[in-house]
Image (spheres, rainbow, N blue to C red):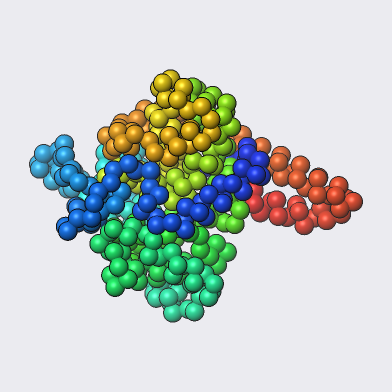
Amino acid sequence: MATITMAASPTSNSSASTTSVSLLQRQSSKNADTVSVCSTTSAFSTCPDRHGFYGGNQFSEKPKKETLTREQIIAREKKWIHMTAHWAEYMNTNYKKVRERCRKGIPDALRQKAWFLLTGANHLMAKFPDWYQHLLDQPGNPQIIDEIRKDQHRQFPHHEMFIDDDKPGQKELFNVLKAYSVYNPTVGYCQAQAPIAAFLLMQLPSEQAFWCFVAICDKYLENYFTPGLEMLQRDAGMLNRLLKKTSPAAYRHLQKHNVDPLLYMTDWFLCAMTRTLPWDTLLRVWDCFLCEGVRIFFKVALVIIGATLGPQKVRSQCNGLCETLAVLRSPPKKFLEEDFIMHHIFRLNITIDDFHREHKKQEMLHRKAKLEQQKAAQQQNGGGGGGGSSNGAGRSS
């Protein structure tokens, strides 16, 4: 698989981290549909839109403007059918072609199969046949079960799959989250996982959605959902460094007003953009994310920040932290549209080498910070207890 999980060293202090974690918890306790930064809203409709929404922030009021002819759509579908039928060959010898086609957008008719293959969920499901049902048959952790039940009705409540407790989506969402908590008890359950699982269930049958969910949590977003959100803190540092390169003016503004990245990017990254982007944009971004990895989310974040805070007029009106956060959390609709996002994320002046270079720098800073913490702890303890701290640091690095 050609996925890259980037990490970045913590550049913020512990109070900023605590603030961000608290922010995520407050957001997750709300209706998930109401915390999207997508600015379009709609009254409740008697008919669902083309994605199954009856209303809310994700409702698409107008039909999608198709830029391709019917003949072009059919031609793309045929290419994807051939490629999925020869998947291993393409991934091993012609990955660039897979990436190119994912960037153009996976045809709706092939998205389910393509996502299942891109994540490697097909291999997981073949390796562990009948495991999904086996996991569901386990009692699970009662505390986690209770947390899942509290959260499941909050995910996309205006969508036809989750609009009430009697819909199959509610039961399937509970099953996927519960099965994963049994499958990976080290992580268990994090509130931010729920919208990801719900989003997958809109695209795939429940068992396939579960194995895609496993791949995303354990590979694409590895260590994102562990207690303390340490990986997110490191990625916040990395985003800050990349922003300095792509949007210097926006970077200087955020530095001037002490706007820690964790205060605005937590929901973007932890929820994998599912509560951030309009639906058509989200599908296109995920087509690329499942092919290229989490660096796609970095690029989307960089485009949103740069476009939102790029104009001098906007920055001059943001005289402090609160005003700046308000702008970042509610970007103009035009900056979230599919054409705008997809046009700009692949035209940023950053390369894969830039990602790798920043990744190495941030890992070094992270190790340095860990060593300083260990030294401080040893001094407080009179020089004792160093062995245990070292083991912990090695695992978390």
**Up/down of 43 relative to 324, above or below:** below
Observer-nearest residue: 369 or 130? 369
**Up/down of 336 relative to 175, above or below:** above
Observer-nearest residue: 142 or 309? 309
- Disc tally is 0
Question: In the displayed structure, does residue 64 sit left or right of residue 283?
Answer: left
| Residue at 28%, 70% in the rendered image | 167
Q: Can residue 281 be seen in this view?
A: yes
Residue 321 rendering spot, x and y as whole percentages: 53, 33
Residue 36 rendering spot, x and y as whole percentages: 38, 47
Residue 42 rendering spot, x and y as whole percentages: 25, 48
| Residue at 34%, 34% in the rendered image | 332
Observer-nearest residue: 138 or 171? 171
Question: In the displayed structure, does residue 275 sit left or right of residue 381?
Answer: left
Residue 65 rendering spot, x and y as whole percentages: 16, 39
Observer-nearest residue: 58 or 114? 58
